[in-house]
């Protein structure tokens, strides 16, 4: 069976497909699954398999940008929360509470400032260790993608052109062969040296057309083989970039959870001195202190004598 030509790319006839092995079995590699064009759901234009891979790259970059934006919002909440805590810790409510209870209360208010500090540090680390690195993109990324796009599109265009040349040469050969056949039939009807001469000419032209077709197919084959090689190397390069992207993002999201755990630990430690002072709140001691300072006289009244 002849091979199938789909959008100027030659594929094996379906019966022969099983003879093809994947280039990288068991890897789900880009280089094995994007050979055909995909019909664009809305438009009439098809997009090449390679363009599908390029779109994935552009989307990946956009997703990374949006993650950075999300982290920025997280930072903003943290900063606002810290500001609110810090403001609250300054409010002089119940500032005149006294004794051990007063000390515990003062520490509780101070703990808000400490907590604010913890949240502020968290937000600044989020910025330097998560948001900023997420916003570092490969240099020249868009330019490189465009270069890939143009390069592969050029190779496809060349393939299309050479495919058209093959078709033309094929048709030309068929015409020549028909012509030769016609002339041969004429000779059967009527022998003539003029017709013999014409047949020689027609045979020469037919041979030439055959050679021409061979040459066109050869050029087409060269073109397709070049496209094939570039498809493999380019899609493997895109695959490498995607692995790099996913690992890089994972690493920075892990940094987020590490920082978040740390924050809880530091946050906890701001509460510990408050707990300690609360444990030593002693109403008897507070009464003693208060009485000593504010007492108005310990002589008790007695009964009247007559
Ligand atoms: C899209 O691809 C199909 C084959 O899959 C082909 O028949 C059709 O002509 C292509 N359309 C365009 C606009 O290239
Ligand atoms: C901070 O306080 C303002 C009002 O004082 C409030 O609208 C806002 O929700 C608070 N933010 C956080 C993160 O607690
Ligand atoms: C084109 O490629 C096919 C498959 O590799 C090969 O069999 C054929 O000889 C080539 N044709 C020409 C004209 O080079
Ligand atoms: C840390 O602070 C936040 C905000 O006050 C609080 O919701 C959280 O429970 C605290 N975590 C610990 C472990 O203290």
Image: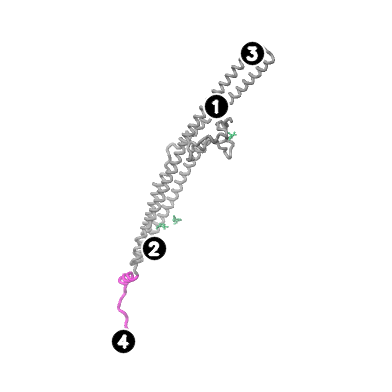
Colouring rule applied to residues: one colour
Residue on which the image places disc 3: 196
Ligand 1 rendered quadrant: top right
Q: Tag 2: Cα neighbours inside 10 Å, few (<14), some, or many (≥20)?
A: few
Depth-wise, is mark 1 or mark 2 nearer the camera? 1
Range of residues picked out in magenta: 283-305
- Give the spatial CA distance, label 1 vs label 4: 135 Å
Circle 1 sits in a helix, a strand or a loop, which is it? Answer: helix
| Circle nearer the N terminus (2, 3) | 2
Q: In x, y percent, where is residue 277?
A: 34, 64
Residue on which the image places disc 2: 93
Q: Nearer the viewer, residue 162 or 16?
A: 16
For the residues bearing labels 1 and 2, Cβ distance under 8 angstroms? no
Depth-wise, is mark 2 or mark 3 nearer the camera? 3
Q: Tag 1: Cα neighbours inside 10 Å, few (<14), some, or many (≥20)?
A: many
- Give the spatial CA distance, label 4 vs label 3: 170 Å
Residue on which the image places disc 1: 162
Q: Nearer the viewer, residue 101 or 222?
A: 222
What residue do we see at 38% from left, 64% from top? 94
Residue on which the image places disc 4: 305
| Circle nearer the N terminus (1, 4) | 1
Q: In x, y percent, where is residue 25?
A: 48, 39
Q: Is residue 14 magenta?
A: no
Depth-wise, is mark 1 or mark 4 nearer the camera? 1
């Amino acid at each position: 069976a002849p091979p199938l030509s789909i959008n100027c790319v030659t594929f094996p006839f379906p019966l022969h497909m099983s003879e093809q092995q994947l280039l990288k079995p068991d890897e789900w590699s880009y280089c094995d699954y994007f050979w055909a064009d995909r019909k664009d759901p809305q438009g009439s234009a098809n997009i090449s398999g390679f363009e599908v891979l390029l779109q994935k790259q552009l989307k990946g970059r956009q997703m990374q940008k949006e993650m950075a934006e999300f982290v920025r919002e997280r930072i903003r909440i943290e900063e606002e929360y810290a500001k609110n805590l810090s403001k609250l810790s300054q409010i002089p409510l119940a500032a005149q509470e006294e004794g051990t209870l007063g000390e515990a209360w003062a520490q509780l208010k101070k703990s808000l400032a400490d907590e604010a500090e913890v949240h502020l540090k968290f937000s600044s680390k989020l910025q330097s260790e998560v948001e900023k690195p997420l916003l570092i993109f490969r240099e020249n990324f868009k330019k490189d993608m465009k270069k890939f796009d143009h390069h592969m599109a050029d190779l496809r265009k060349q393939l299309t052109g050479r495919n058209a040349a093959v078709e033309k040469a094929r048709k030309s050969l068929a015409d020549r062969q028909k012509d030769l056949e016609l002339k041969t039939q004429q000779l059967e009807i009527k022998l003539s040296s003029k017709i013999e001469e014409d047949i020689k000419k027609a045979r020469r032209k037919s041979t030439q057309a055959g050679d021409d077709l061979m040459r066109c197919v050869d050029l087409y084959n060269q073109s397709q083989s070049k496209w094939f090689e570039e498809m493999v190397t380019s899609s493997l390069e895109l695959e490498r970039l995607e692995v790099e992207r996913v690992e890089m993002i994972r690493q920075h999201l892990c940094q987020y959870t590490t920082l978040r755990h740390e924050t809880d630990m530091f946050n906890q430690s701001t509460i510990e001195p408050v707990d300690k002072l609360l444990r030593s709140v002693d109403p008897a001691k507070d009464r003693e202190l208060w009485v000593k300072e504010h007492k108005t006289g310990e002589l008790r009244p007695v009964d009247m004598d007559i």
